[in-house]
Every structure is written in C-alpha cells, then in structure tokens.
C-alpha cells in the first residue's frame, strides 16, 4: 500500500512542479528566407516611406528647369536662405531623409568645390563664402532625426572637360570625393544617366564612381535607374506598377537606357537582385521653383502616396526652395495637410476591434507565428506564417468582436526581411470579393472602389505565392478624403 501512496505522491509532485515550472518546450524556428534579401540599409530606406528632394540652384533664379551652363554665378543670390526653415518643413511632413541637388545639369555647384569656380564662390550670396551643402547638412544634424543625401548631376553643361572621357570622369570623381568626405554620413546618393547631345561619346564611369562611393561610405544607398541599391520606378509621376516586385535582374539594366521603363515599374518575380523602386515626383509641376507654379492638391498627393508607398515603394517628393532660399508658405501648408491626412487615415486601425484566425499556423498554437502577429505593431519581424503543410487555401480572417467595423482602405504588409513572396491575393468582405491584387511587398494599400463598407468578417486570401506567405501587418482604415466617384484611375501597369 505504502508503495502506491509513494507512487501517487511522486506523480502529484511532478504535476504540481510542472504547473509551477513548466518545461520549456522547443520554440518553433522561423522559416528559411527566400532570396534575394534586402540589405540593412535597404530595409531602413524602405521604412522611411516618404523622403524629400530639394531642387535648388541657378535655375531657381532664372525660372528654368534645365540651365544651359552659361548662367553667371552672380544670379545665385538667395536673400533669406535658411536651411533650418527647410528642416522644419521636412520634420513637419514626418520625413526622415532629404536629398539636395549639390549640382544639377547646369554645372553650378552649391558647395565651394576646389575643382571649379562655377559655384557659390563666385556668387554674391554670403560674399562668396557660403556653402549651401554645409548649411543643409548642419541644419539636418541640428534638427535630429533627419538624414541627408545628395545628387551630383553627371551631365554638366558648363564644364569644358565634359565630353572628354578621362578628364571629365576624373573631375566628377574628385567632386564625389569632396561630397562624401566632407559632409558626414550620407544615406543616399542619386545618379542619373542624362547626357548632352553635343557629346554623344561621353561615357560615365559608373563602376568606378560606385566603387568609390562604397569605399568611402559603405552603408549609403546608391540610386540610379539600375541601382545598385535603389532603382528608378520608370516615370516621374510617382506611380509604381500595380504589380511591383522589389526584385529585378540588375545586370540586365543600364543607366539612362530607354525602353526599360515597364520592367523598372513592375520588377521581376524571378529577379536575382533586391533593388526596390523609388518614385520621384514633384509637389509642383517643375522640379525647380517657379513663381507661376503652385503645389499639387492634397487629393493628388494622396493618390501618389497610394500609388507609391501603397505599392511597395518609397515616395521621393520634391519640394523646391524659392528665390529667397525658403520653402514657400503654400508648400509648407500643403505638406502639413498631407502629413495630417496620412496620420488621420492610418493612426486608427479598426482591425484591432476584431478577433482573428487563420487557415493554419506554423508550429501550431504555441509556435509563435499565429495570426495575432499581424496586429502587434511590428511591421517587419513578427508575422503570421501558415504551416508548411498548408498547401490549400491560405487565409486570415478578421471578425468584428461587436457588430461591424467601418473602413474604406485595407493595408497588408509582408515580412520582407525574409524575401518578397506573395504573387496574388484576394479580399472578401462578408463572403463577397471586394478587392484583389498581385504583389504585396513592404506595404500594399487597397482603397476600396466601393467606398466605405461596414463589415462583420474580412478575409484576406493568398492565392499564389513564391513560397509560404509571411504577413507582418494588416490594417482596416477609414480615409475621409477618399471619394471613389471623383476618381479617374491612374494609368498604371497591371
Ligand atoms: C564619337 O566617336 C565616333 C567613333 O569613335 C567618332 O567617329 C566621332 O567623331 C565621335 N564624335 C565626337 C563628337 O567626338
Ligand atoms: C531574371 O533572371 C532569372 C535568373 O537568371 C531568369 O530566370 C529570369 O528569366 C530573368 N528575367 C527576365 C525578365 O529575363
Ligand atoms: C458592444 O456594443 C454595444 C452597443 O454599441 C456596447 O454597449 C458594448 O459596450 C460593446 N461591447 C464591447 C465589448 O465593445
């Protein structure tokens, strides 16, 4: 008998101890990534969502877009230049990276380059002792939280070395070194392939330039039509393709080449390089400030936002300082409205009022990959993953806990740190299909053509994917600015 009691005693003890100190089960491992993957710098860039371009130079004073190179440096005379005012506007717009045109096609340099006198040195501004690049960089630093980038135009319509390959490439590389060595950390450097028709044989030594850039600042992102870190989206309207892969075959691209715009716009699911697109667009018609132009309407800016950020891209919004050297009050106001609208739309996620379930989850109930991860506020490294065996339908279902939820925008985000995967998805509201799409990537926004809906259940189905889909975040939002009736659909790629 005693033995039985001993036995029962031991068993009870084990049960009690286990409930106090549960044995740590093995945690389910994350799934393998699918190549190619973003670099650390590319991930940081993607999360910025909106970045800003500042076109400023002699064109600001001559009312032109492309200077001839024959402008006198004496026209450059901003009377109230204040880079702190720029940074205030940039910060108010919630933007964390700004890129300045250190030199545009006209060849005039906003910093006192040692290698030319076609620069601020010969201007009346600050008696030729000024340095706009330095003011820009210092103001960003003083502001905290704003990073900087620069554009140094390869095409130079002023310098006599242009057209002579060796001399001009040496000149360009020397200026690149000045900018990369003397102005602290730059987060992005911008290149394009524009060329003069008067120098058809001019060759830009991009490989040399890019190697030098990475040698001097390894964490910088290099932008050009063809990367190597960020690619052009193929147009200057700020619209990405409805299908938009961050992946593409970089080696098949060349900088300044025509005819690749469609490929740049949509990317390539088989692409061997992670080379995500940036959508450059100006708040006004032109890139430089012109007295007669005014900023785009809020509705236009929002449309660009949905067609760029909402299609897996970063929006590069140009806001040109004016003749005084300030960002115009009209533009400052519009930027404030734009940021206010984005915050209004996205600061509330009614999906948080829903219960959530999924077709399956990796590692089962305690695997750590359940559908609740799409509502935890982390947009990258926590995510819902279906089980590997889930070859049937892969879906997440949100159900209003109490009555219905109201929204007109649906947001889906993939865990792109493990590669871009989703090829096709569909969204159902109370059983009826309300939207469908192809790629998702970092962020996909659907503005519902139907307008506002009040729904009990919302189902997001992944119908085609390169590998197990990983969804990091889902949102149901209400956009009070969205009027589907007043909308002419954007001429975007399918
Ligand atoms: C460009 O190169 C071609 C072939 O080498 C040559 O015939 C032509 O004269 C060059 N053009 C100029 C403007 O230098
Ligand atoms: C991109 O490269 C991959 C791998 O080499 C290839 O399978 C794919 O067809 C290429 N894409 C295009 C559009 O050529
Ligand atoms: C559900 O809705 C009713 C009526 O609107 C409200 O009184 C109640 O507090 C809600 N319950 C929860 C849990 O939100």
Image: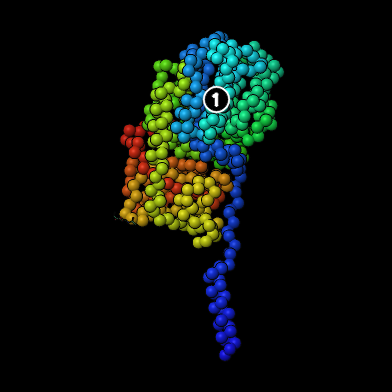
Image coloring type: rainbow
Give above or below for 273 relative to 280.
below
Q: In terms of secondary structure, where does tag 1 sit? A: helix
**Residue lying furthest right in this view?**
166
Q: How dense is the environment of label 1, judged by Cα within 10 Å: few (below 14), some, or many (20 and up)?
A: many
- Mark count: 1
Q: Residue at (46%, 28%) from the top-left corner? A: 89
Q: Residue at (55%, 56%) from the top-left corner? A: 388
Going by the image, does 133 lie left or right of 79? right
x and y percent of residue 166 in the render?
A: 70, 18
Is residue 400 visible in the rendered structure shown here? yes
- The quarter of the picture where the N terminus appears is bottom right
x and y percent of residue 57 in the render?
A: 53, 17
x and y percent of residue 423 in the render?
A: 51, 45
Is residue 68 visible in the rendered structure shown here? no
98 and 258: which is toward the camera: 98
Going by the image, does 3 lie left or right of 235? right
Q: Residue at (66%, 14%) from the top-left corner? A: 161
Give above or below for 477 relative to 178.
below
x and y percent of residue 255 in the render?
A: 60, 27
Q: For mark 1, what is the residue?
A: 136
Give above or below for 267 relative to 354.
above
332 and 103: which is toward the camera: 332
257 and 88: which is toward the camera: 88
**Residue lying furthest bottom in this view?**
1
Ligand 1 under 8 Å from disc 1 Cβ: no
């Amino acid at each position: 008998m005693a033995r039985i009691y001993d036995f029962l005693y031991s068993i009870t003890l084990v049960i009690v101890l286990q409930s106090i100190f549960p044995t740590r089960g093995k945690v389910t491992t994350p799934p393998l990534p699918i190549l190619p993957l973003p670099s650390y710098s590319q991930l940081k860039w993607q999360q910025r969502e909106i970045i800003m371009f500042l076109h400023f130079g002699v064109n600001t004073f001559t009312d032109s877009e492309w200077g001839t190179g024959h402008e006198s440096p004496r026209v450059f005379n901003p009377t109230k230049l204040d880079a702190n005012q720029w940074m205030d506007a940039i910060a108010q717009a919630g933007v964390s990276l700004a890129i300045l045109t250190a030199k545009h096609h006209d060849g005039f340099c906003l910093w006192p380059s040692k290698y030319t006198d076609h620069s601020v040195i010969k201007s009346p501004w600050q008696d030729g002792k000024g340095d706009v690049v330095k003011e820009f960089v210092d103001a960003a630093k003083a502001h905290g939280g704003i990073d900087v980038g620069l554009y140094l135009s390869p095409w130079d319509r002023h310098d006599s070395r242009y057209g002579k390959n060796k001399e001009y490439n040496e000149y360009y590389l020397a200026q690149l070194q000045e900018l990369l060595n003397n102005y602290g950390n730059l987060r992005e450097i911008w290149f394009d392939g524009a060329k003069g028709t008067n120098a058809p044989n001019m060759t830009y030594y991009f490989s040399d330039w890019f190697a030098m850039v990475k040698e001097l600042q390894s964490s910088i992102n290099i932008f050009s039509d063809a990367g190597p870190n960020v690619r052009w989206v193929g147009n200057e309207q700020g619209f990405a393709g409805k299908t938009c892969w961050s992946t593409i075959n970089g080696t098949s691209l060349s900088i300044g080449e025509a005819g690749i715009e469609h490929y740049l716009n949509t990317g390539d699911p088989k692409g061997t390089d992670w080379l995500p697109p940036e959508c450059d667009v100006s708040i006004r018609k032109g890139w430089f400030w012109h007295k007669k132009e005014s900023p785009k309407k809020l509705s236009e800016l929002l449309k660009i936002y949905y067609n760029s950020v909402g299609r897996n891209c970063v929006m590069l919004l140009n806001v040109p300082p004016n003749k005084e050297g300030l960002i115009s009050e009209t533009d400052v106001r519009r930027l404030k409205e734009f940021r206010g609208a984005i915050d209004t739309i996205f600061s509330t996620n009614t999906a948080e009022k829903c219960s959530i379930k999924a077709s399956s989850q990796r590692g089962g109930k305690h695997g750590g990959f359940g559908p609740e991860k799409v509502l935890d506020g982390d947009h990258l490294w926590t995510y819902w993953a279906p089980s590997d065996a889930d070859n049937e339908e892969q879906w997440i279902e949100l159900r209003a806990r109490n009555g219905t939820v109201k929204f007109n925008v649906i947001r889906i985000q993939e865990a792109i740190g493990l590669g871009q995967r989703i090829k096709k998805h569909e969204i159902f509201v109370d059983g009826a299909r309300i939207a469908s799409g192809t790629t998702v990537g970092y962020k996909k926004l659907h503005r519902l053509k139907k307008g506002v809906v009040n729904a009990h259940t919302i189902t997001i189905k992944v119908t085609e994917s390169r590998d197990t889909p990983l969804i990091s975040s889902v949102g149901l939002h209400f956009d009070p600015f969205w009027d589907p009736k007043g909308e002419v659909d954007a001429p975007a790629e399918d």
